[in-house]
């Protein structure tokens, strides 16, 4: 035996003693102190500590795979909390009481082995409190190798793997960290591709693109190309991007090999958004294969983090198994390196304002919903669907949804006698409202004509100046002419739809006017001074 081994061991013990005193001194290290307390009180046990969020032992036991029996009678420190119901609509739910454990003990059983598990919340002056598990396993010959207990290692591996998996939840990145959101998962369970009204070809292609990506890993490997893909959803608000994302999350969670979804809300961080981007992609690589969603991509990726984001998307590190979906209302605001570079975002899907066929399909969808609701008081014949589709030219899906919701609420109030508004609209001669609808009306600013010959004023070198005259009057938009079948001219549901459509259309028109007036004011203020200066210079030159 090497004679230097014993002195080295003694030196190490002395050094470790100094380290212990340092950590147990005025600068208290609670994590280490608790570890030493347990080692001293349970000398025949090995002690291992781990973070709760990395290895949720009690959550693992709640599945029935293991058991955890609380031993709190002899000493328990916890904050008792009342958790109210998720919403006040559920009158039978009284809420529940839960514990925020500061110090607690459980007798833990797993895989025919017994453990003692302590949960301790360790606080520090300079850091946020950290929740830890201390796992105690009884020592026997050969049970400890390199400072680790064999049975504890097996438990932590199994529970750690379970913790990283999503259990009826969606990973959400918010305020610089990931958390599991069970409410969002529950919300998307009611969403399906049947609820998404798109052209049949577009919807079929979108579903095929996503599902075939996760089905064809061997094909990517055989072609020696990275198993990754990027998709952009773009278009004006209210036309199906969000409902498509919900349907996508739900359909992937129901596969035989469920695909987890990761949703990025923001990149906020006290240091830099680059830290958040690194955390996002590091977690996505661990969770792959997965769906990684960046909603409102144009507002998330700004100039100060664009380069770092692109390096994470298409840099040296592998992104195998990651399908990225970015949504934006403003495709033109995205950097070309993101929007137009294959291998980053390969395919773009345009969610446009619905055409006549799509509006009719959406109206039929609502007719089916009304009929399934069991409300026999609403007469919603199929002939109305074509009328509503023609009447709502220029409506987004969001406005169409509001049209039907407002109509049904109006009818419900009328049925109870609470509707103070009288519907004065009528359908005469098979025609509902007239004129033209255009979402692209703009303000025209014309050059002024001089009093003599109608020519524009010239500068010193004969160039036209940018003089501004009052803008052309914008013609008010109206609902289009629609032919109404004789069989439904007296239909109450159709009358109510027309009234609500007119009200919504007026709101749309007023919103446009507010935006146009703001732009007009800004343009006139910007151009008026230079025009006056150039006119003065032109007069001086002529004299």
Image (cartoon, rainbow, N blue to C red):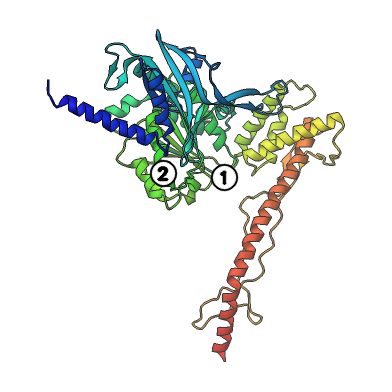
User: Residue 474 versus residue 32: which sits nearer the camera?
Assistant: 32
Which residue appears at 60% of the width and 24% of the height? Answer: 98
Circle 1 SS class: loop
Which residue appears at 43% of the width and 16% of the height? Answer: 116
Distance from disc 1 to disc 2, alpha carbons, whole Å, reads 31 Å
Which residue appears at 57% of the width and 45% of the height? Answer: 236
Q: Residues within 10 Å of mark 2 (few under 14, many from 20)?
A: some
Disc 1 target residue: 236
Q: Quadrant of the C terminus?
A: bottom right
In the rendering, at what x and y percent does residue 184 appear? 56, 30
**Left or right placement of residue 86 versus residue 188 in this view:** right
In the rendering, at what x and y percent does residue 219 appear? 32, 26
Residue 402 visible in the picture? yes
Residue extending furthest bottom? 543
Observer-side mark, 1 or 2, equals 2
Residues at discs 1 and 2 in contact (Cβ within 8 Å)? no
Instruction: Give the quarter of the image for residue 132.
Output: top left
Q: Quadrant of the N terminus?
A: top left
Residue extending furthest left? 2
Disc 2 target residue: 275
Residue extending furthest top? 112
User: Residue 543 versus residue 292: which sits nearer the camera?
Assistant: 292
Residue 201 visible in the picture? no
Instruction: Give the quarter of the image for residue 404.
Output: top right
Q: Residues within 10 Å of mark 1 (few under 14, many from 20)?
A: some
In the rendering, at what x and y percent does residue 8 appear? 19, 28
Does residue 529 sit above or below 224 in this rendering? below
User: Residue 486 versus residue 250: which sits nearer the camera?
Assistant: 250
User: Who comes first in sequence, dot 1 or dot 2?
Assistant: 1
Circle 2 SS class: helix
Does residue 40 sit above or below 507 in this rendering? above
Q: Which mark is residue 365?
A: none
């Amino acid at each position: 035996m090497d004679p230097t081994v014993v002195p080295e061991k003694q030196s190490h013990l002395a050094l470790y003693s100094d380290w212990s005193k340092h950590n147990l001194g005025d600068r208290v290290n609670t994590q280490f102190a608790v570890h030493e307390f347990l080692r001293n009180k349970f000398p025949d046990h090995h002690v291992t500590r781990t973070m709760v969020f990395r290895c949720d032992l009690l959550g693992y036991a709640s599945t029935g795979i293991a058991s955890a029996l609380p031993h709190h009678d002899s000493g328990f420190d916890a904050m008792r909390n009342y958790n109210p119901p998720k919403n006040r609509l559920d009158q039978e739910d009284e809420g529940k009481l839960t514990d925020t454990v500061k110090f607690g003990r459980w007798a833990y059983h797993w895989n025919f082995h017994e453990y003692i598990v302590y949960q301790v919340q360790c606080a520090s002056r300079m850091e946020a409190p950290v929740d830890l598990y201390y796992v105690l396993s009884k020592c026997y010959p050969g049970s400890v190798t390199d400072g680790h207990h064999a049975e504890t290692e097996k438990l932590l591996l199994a529970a750690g793997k379970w913790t990283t998996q999503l259990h009826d939840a969606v990973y959400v990145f918010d305020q610089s960290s990931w958390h599991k959101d069970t409410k969002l998962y529950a919300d998307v369970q009611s969403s399906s591709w049947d609820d998404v009204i798109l052209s049949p070809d577009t919807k079929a292609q979108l579903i095929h693109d996503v599902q075939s990506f996760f089905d064809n890993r061997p094909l990517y490997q055989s072609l020696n190309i990275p198993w990754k893909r990027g998709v952009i959803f773009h278009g004006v608000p209210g036309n199906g991007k969000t409902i498509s994302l919900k349907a996508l999350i739900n359909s992937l969670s129901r596969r035989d090999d469920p695909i987890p979804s990761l949703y990025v809300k923001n990149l906020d961080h006290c240091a830099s958004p680059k830290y958040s981007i690194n955390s996002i992609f590091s977690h996505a690589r661990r969770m792959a294969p997965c769906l990684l969603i960046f909603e409102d991509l144009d507002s998330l990726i700004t100039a100060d983090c664009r380069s770092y984001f692109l390096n994470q998307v298409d840099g040296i590190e592998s992104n195998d198994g990651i399908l990225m979906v970015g949504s934006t209302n403003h495709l033109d605001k995205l950097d070309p390196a993101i929007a137009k570079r294959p291998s980053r975002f390969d395919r773009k899907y345009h969610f446009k304002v619905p055409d006549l066929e799509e509006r009719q399909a959406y109206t039929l969808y609502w007719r089916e919903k009304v009929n399934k609701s069991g409300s026999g008081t609403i007469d919603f014949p199929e002939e109305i669907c074509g009328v509503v589709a023609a009447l709502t030219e220029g409506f987004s899906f969001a406005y169409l949804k509001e049209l039907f919701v407002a109509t049904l609420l109006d009818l419900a109030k009328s049925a109870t006698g609470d509707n103070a508004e009288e519907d004065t609209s009528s359908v005469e001669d098979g025609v509902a409202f007239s004129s033209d609808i255009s979402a692209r009306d703009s303000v025209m600013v014309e050059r002024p004509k001089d009093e003599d010959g109608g020519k524009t004023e010239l500068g010193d070198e004969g160039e036209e100046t940018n003089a501004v005259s009052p803008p052309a009057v914008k013609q008010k938009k109206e609902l289009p002419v629609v032919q109404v079948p004789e069989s439904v001219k007296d239909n109450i549901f159709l009358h109510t739809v027309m009234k609500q459509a007119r009200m919504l259309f007026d709101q749309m028109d007023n919103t446009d006017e507010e935006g146009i007036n703001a732009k007009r004011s800004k343009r006139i203020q910007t151009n008026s001074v230079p025009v006056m200066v150039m006119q003065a210079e032109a007069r001086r030159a002529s004299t």
